[in-house]
Amino acid sequence: MIKKGNWKWHVYIIECKDGFYYTGITWNIEVRMEQHRIGKGSRFTAKHGFKRLCYTEEFDDLVQARNREHQLKDFSRKKKEALFQ
């Protein structure tokens, strides 16, 4: 089990301005969302624009969070939308 102090790991899905979804992982959701808002979060969101945070899950363990992130990335659009609509 990999932990960083008392950090919680967040797996998240954001909607981009052009309708695409981006799935990521972070230990500080507030800072990461600000990075996406200003175009510094990832190349993908810099290109497609940040619209809103749609979904988050919290984990104590980094390995579990990474596994869930990869699982969510494989979800179809419809399956992702079922999580938050």
Image (cartoon, helix red, strand yellow):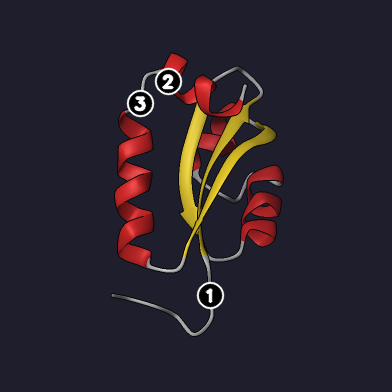
Mark 1 neighbour density, 10 Å: few (under 14) some (14–19) many (20 or more): some
- Say which amino acid is labelled 2: Lys
* Residue 20 picture location, percent across and down: 53, 22
Marks 3,2: beta carbons within 8 A: yes
- How many angstroms separate mark 3 from mark 1 (CA)? 26 Å
- Say which amino acid is labelled 1: Trp
SS for tag 1?
loop
* Residue 63 picture location, percent across and down: 30, 63
SS for tag 2?
helix
Look at mark 1 in the image and give the residue it sits on: 7
Q: Residue at point 66% right, 50% down? A: 33
Say which quarter of the image contains residue 69.
top left
Q: Say left or right for 63 vs 3.
A: left
Q: For the C terminus, which image quadrant?
A: top right
Q: Is residue 4 above or below residue 20?
A: below
- How many angstroms separate mark 3 from mark 2 (CA)? 6 Å
Number of labels in the image equals 3
Q: Residue furthest top?
A: 78
- Say which amino acid is labelled 3: Phe
Q: Residue furthest bottom?
A: 5
Marks 3,1: beta carbons within 8 A: no
Q: Nearer the viewer, residue 60 or 13?
A: 60
Look at mark 3 in the image and give the residue it sits on: 75
Q: Residue at point 65% right, 53% down? A: 35
Q: Say left or right for 31 vs 71.
A: right
SS for tag 3?
loop
Q: For the N terminus, which image quadrant?
A: bottom left
- How many angstroms separate mark 1 from mark 2 (CA)? 28 Å
Q: Say left or right for 77 vs 46.
A: left
Q: Earlier in the sequence, mark 3 or mark 1?
A: 1
The dot on residue 79 is 2
Marks 1,2: beta carbons within 8 A: no
